[in-house]
């Protein structure tokens, strides 16, 4: 809580203007710079998430969700062996990118609503815009994997990354498990950042913040499990 130095009124931690005398309590953040904020989230999560929550314009939130969607889509393409559906690697990459952008953009509001709902159930409160932006910046590690780990996977396995003839873990097991392990670490890092964002915006204890992050991740993975087989059937119809 923030106590107004002028009138001693008690305000919420993220309040910029006093609810009583309308005096300024802290500096207003107008816009977010993508690279500065992204680096700050990785280096000093809670400080940067506070900037995100205070920002008037939640810049790049949908962009980050779209990038996350691409990373998720290629994971589903690997799981469903979509290389057996498409004619070649280029076609697979084009379809995965387009479908990922659509998927990430469409599911972004659902992620924000889910995050806000879980937080409210556990006794906190997160505005929709903050939920959208905080989850977007928490996904930075997975977005980074799209430009670091994924190109290495493509260079190592090529079209076999999305095929079972042979599957990538048979083709080069050491590289496959090393890269899969790195992807897992980045996913856990993103879950950790959701926890840090929750502690900052809701003032939750460590246990409740972890619970929010785990429940949100579990709900999202459950959604992907339902959509995964439907995805293959859809592309089989249109390919």
Image (cartoon, rainbow, N blue to C red):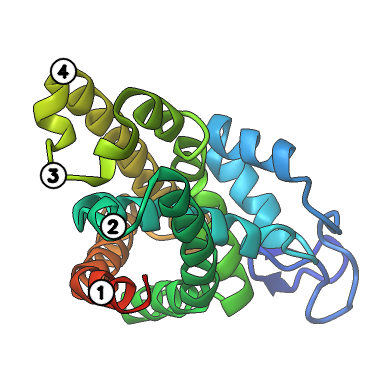
Task: State the residue position of label 4.
Answer: 174
User: Nearer the viewer's eye, disc 4 or disc 3?
Assistant: 3
Q: Earlier in the sequence, mark 1 or mark 2?
A: 2
- Looking at the rendered structure, the secondary structure element under dot 1 is helix
Q: How far apart in space, not on screen, are marks 2 and 3 (Cα)?
A: 14 Å
Task: Kindly check if marks 4 and 1 are in contact, taking CB atoms under 8 A apart as contact.
Answer: no
Q: Which of marks 1 and 3 is nearer the N terminus?
A: 3
Task: State the residue position of label 1.
Answer: 227
Query: In this picture, is 182 found above or below 60?
Result: above
Task: State the residue position of label 3.
Answer: 164
User: Nearer the viewer's eye, disc 1 or disc 3?
Assistant: 3
Left or right of 185, for residue 151 = right
Of the numbered discs in the image, which one, if any, rests on residue 81?
Answer: none
Query: In this picture, is 206 found above or below 6?
Result: above
Of all residues, the one furthest to the front in this rendering is 87
Instruction: Say which of 90 and 167 sits in front.
Output: 90
Of the numbered discs in the image, which one, if any, rests on residue 76?
Answer: 2
Q: Which residue is drawn at 83% across and 56% down?
A: 31
Task: Kindly check if marks 1 and 2 are in contact, taking CB atoms under 8 A apart as contact.
Answer: yes
Residue 1 appears in the rendering: no
């Amino acid at each position: 809580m923030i106590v107004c130095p002028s009138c001693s009124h008690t305000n919420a931690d993220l309040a910029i203007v006093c609810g009583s005398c309308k005096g300024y309590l802290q500096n207003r953040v107008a816009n977010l710079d993508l690279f500065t904020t992204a680096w700050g989230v990785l280096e000093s999560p809670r400080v940067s998430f506070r900037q995100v929550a205070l920002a008037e314009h939640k810049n790049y939130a949908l962009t980050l969700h779209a990038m996350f969607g691409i990373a998720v889509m290629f994971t589903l393409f690997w799981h469903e062996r979509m290389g057996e559906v498409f004619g070649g690697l280029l076609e697979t990459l084009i379809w995965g990118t387009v479908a990922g952008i659509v998927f990430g953009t469409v599911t972004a509001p659902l992620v924000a609503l889910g995050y806000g709902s879980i937080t409210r159930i556990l006794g906190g409160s997160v505005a929709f815009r903050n939920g959208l932006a905080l989850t977007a910046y928490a996904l930075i590690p997975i977005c980074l994997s799209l430009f670091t780990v994924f190109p290495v996977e493509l260079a190592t396995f090529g079209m076999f990354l999305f095929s079972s003839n042979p599957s990538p873990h048979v083709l080069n097991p050491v590289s496959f498990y090393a890269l899969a392990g790195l992807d897992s670490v980045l996913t856990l890092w993103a879950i950790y950042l959701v926890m840090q964002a929750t502690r900052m915006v809701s003032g939750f204890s460590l246990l409740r913040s972890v619970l929010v992050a785990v429940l949100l991740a579990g709900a999202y993975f459950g959604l992907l499990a339902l959509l995964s087989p439907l995805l293959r059937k859809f592309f089989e119809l249109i390919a």
